[in-house]
Amino acid sequence: MTPLQALHKYFGYTEFRHQQEAIVQQVLTVGDALVLMPTGGGKSLCYQLPAVLLSGLTVVISPLIALMKDQVDALNINGIPAAFLNSSQNPNEQQSIVSRLKSGEIKLLYLAPERLFGSESRLVTFLKTLNVSLIAIDEAHCISHWGHDFRPEYLMLSSFKTEFPKTPVIALTATADDLTRKDIREKLALHQPKEFVSSFNRPNISYTVAPKKDSYNQLLGFLDEHQEDSGIIYCLSRQNTEHLAADLQKQGYAAKAYHAGLDNETKALNQDQFLRDEVKIIVATIAFGMGINKSNVRYVVHYDLPKNIEGYYQETGRAGRDGLPSEALLFFSAGDAFKLQRFARVEGNEDQSRIMLKKLDDMVKYCQLQTCRRQYLMHYFNEQFPDHCGSCDVCLTEYKKFDGTVIAQKALSAVYRLNQRFGTNYVIDLLRGSRSEKIREEHKQLKTYGIGNDLSKAEWQRYIGQLVIQGYLQVTDDQYPVLKLTSTSEAVLKGQQQVEFSISEAMEEEAKATEPTVYEADLLHELKTIRFNLAMNENVPAYIILSDATLQEMAT
Ligand code: ADP
Ligand code: MG
Ligand code: ZN
């Protein structure tokens, strides 16, 4: 039987998707493979189809016991003998599977990683007595610290290559960043693996970010337009999932909560009802969804800020698996970003903290984009994409440009005056003349103190974000990211370079002062001082040459 014939016969599909055919060929010719395909792309078929064509057994490692049964049931319905072994079974059930394995009747065996090596290595010894044709490692990113879902037991899987040196290994994941990819290759000791990277674009999902203000009512408005649809709402905390689900129930929505703290029965029940469309809305922590195969999820809402793009993209990817138009809506607030920043700092592990903070920063940038969100996501996954998708909120919004030079000068002055040693929040506190004692006492003598109190904190965040995107400011990669001037800042401070900001109608309504502001005396004074300082070091950008001591001296 050819792979295409098997595709018709066992799966009832007419054609291969993405690179499924090439992937199947690769493992059939006994080569290792690393498969990167977005959620819903059709990864399972890449090992299930070879499994029916190969003479021996295909061992599938999958992290979630709860999902094995579904997968195995689906295979059996299609006439493919499959089974799983896990701790949810009694000894009799396990024994019967073992004998079916011995007789060579089973084509696919699903296992959780923790059962394989270590104290239960008898299982590996047993597997070695069988004819194992292929090893498939699903959700392979779980092996990497850099992924969003590290599972220590996955590290044991590195023993596969030693125990089964001649058996091809196929690793599959929807998480594509370089670090994770490298980790998978190395930790699984894949032998010259062929990489198959499918486009991560999900054209039928449209992406929207809304300010997290009055978010409950915004959500009700959104749900009102999706009365008949199934959707997932992600919250950060377990408690919030329960509160929100209860609130939505009061509004008449069939909504249920889902989080790791619920007992197994409730979790299984809520998930089942959702899969059967008896419950339309699942309000969940990120514990919900991996491997969930519900094709008609019409929307995914992030009620709180996700920790990183990988997680966000995987979660939004659960919408629209049937290819029909679907929505991803995220509520963003700077407050959420600060909260996550605190979580991201792992005591005693600077490397990890730095990476987590960087990932969070990329997530925040995504929320503040004024360019196509899909393009940003695709670039994040190392994929080329034109600068306009036509279906994200940014592409669909008309932006008005305005002269933001004065706003920019204020921000850059503040950064300069703080000797480029503080982060965005501190700079904003100075600009807005924060009454916090520390800032007041330390900086009230500066004209910059309070020079920007005509704008709200959120507006400053947006404008500073735009200055970073436009390259007039940069954020350091440190554990405590700091704002620094760049080589183009100077021209702005000197009034030689205009800065344009863009603003949508919605933002304009929010904003109080967006017209080019008149030059206040304080700003003029400030700019004069700074320009003088800059002139003293004419040929060299100020940010390189001015030492703290020099600055201090000049400012007084
Ligand atoms: P992933 O593991 O990549 O998230 P799955 O393997 O669960 O995705 O597949 C997602 C859906 O796509 C499933 O419903 C599956 O049956 C379907 N599918 C997979 N391959 C094909 C194909 N070649 N043609 C049509 N549907 C497919
Ligand atoms: Mg899968
Ligand atoms: Zn777009």
Image (spheres, rainbow, N blue to C red):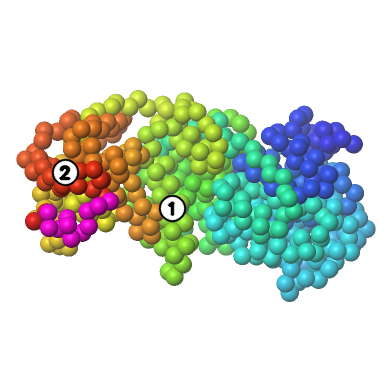
Q: Position of residue 45 (x, y in %)?
A: 74, 42
Magenta stretch: includes residue 548 = yes
Indicate the amino acid at tag 1: Lys
Which quadrant holds residue 554? bottom left
Extreme residue in the front direction: 539
Question: Mark 1: which secondary structure?
Answer: helix
- Labelled disc at residue 535: 2
Which quadrant holds residue 157? bottom right
Residue 496 placement, left or right of 298: left
Q: Could you tell me if the residues under marks 1 and 2 are in contact, i.e. CB atoms within 8 Å?
A: no
Main SS of residues in magenta? helix
Residue 520 versus residue 111: which sits nearer the camera? 520
Indicate the amino acid at tag 2: Ala
User: Does the rendering let one see residue 508?
Assistant: no
Q: Residue at x 21, y 49 (%)?
A: 416
Location of the C terminus (image quadrant) = bottom left
